Image (tube, rainbow, N blue to C red):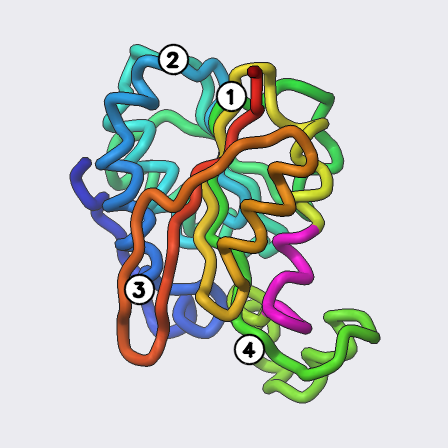
Amino acid sequence: METPLYRFNSTDRDQVYEPAEDSFLLLDALEDELESIKRLRPLLSLEVGSGSGIIITALANALGNECGCFLGVDINPHACRMTSKTAEMNECCLSVINMNLLSGFKSGLIDLLIFNPPYVPTCGQSDGRLEEQLDQFDEKRYDLVRSWAGGFDGMMITSRILEDLDRLLSPVGVFYLLLLKENKPAEVLVRMESRNFKGSIVKERKIRGEHLFVVKISRNTR
């Protein structure tokens, strides 16, 4: 898959997460998985937390007319506008929804789900809301902080998606999730196995003090 064209100005960088090593690791993982994804022939492919839009745009362009609808979802309206801009720059047909995660979707619709979540641990205690923990950061860059700050163990946002995964995925649905070593990806997979899912690590990379993983999770149909 080709990395899409994208353009950030100085204001965008204060409001939207700019593509970095984690973004490119996820792109590489999806490229490795592309033939498997094509065989899946997803009717609905969705990236939650689309940010710059490069992931869902690259996927839509790679799959082309072979598959159905492509959606980017983000709680940050600036990110929604950036995703739309990236799609337009790359002549890509996709829709963007400004929404907090995926509670607004009907059950069993998503064939392909992608998430590069806020994964950085931001506190040492499990109590308290994430918004309260973010008060320690620069309020002027609140939208940007939300794109990487994951609360206790970095999993406060990711866990909400994992807990709702059985409802979200179609019977053949597949979930690609980026995790940090501190998020304990092996434990995440074991936990999902107890909920009748199967999973594996499909790619990993060490970068500038971070050890990142991309995991693939699907229903256990055995």
The amino acid type of the residue labelled 2 equals Arg
| Sequence-first tag of 4 and 1 | 1
Quadrant including the N terminus = top left
Quadrant of the rendered image containing residue 164: top right
Quadrant including the C terminus = top right
The amino acid type of the residue labelled 4 equals Arg
| Tag 4–tag 2 contact (CB < 8 Å) | no
Q: CA distance from mark 3 to mark 1?
A: 26 Å
Which contiguous range is marked in magenta?
A: 150-159
| Tag 2–tag 3 contact (CB < 8 Å) | no
| Badge 3: residue crowd in 10 Å (few <14, some 14–19, many ≥20) | few
Q: Is residue 181 shown in magenta?
A: no
What x and y, as percent, mark residue 165? 66, 34
Above or below for 207 versus 199: below
Q: CA distance from mark 4 to mark 2?
A: 39 Å
Q: Does 198 sit left or right of 106 as displayed? A: left
Return the residue at label 1.
111
Question: Which of the labelled discs sits on residue 41, or is there none?
Answer: 2
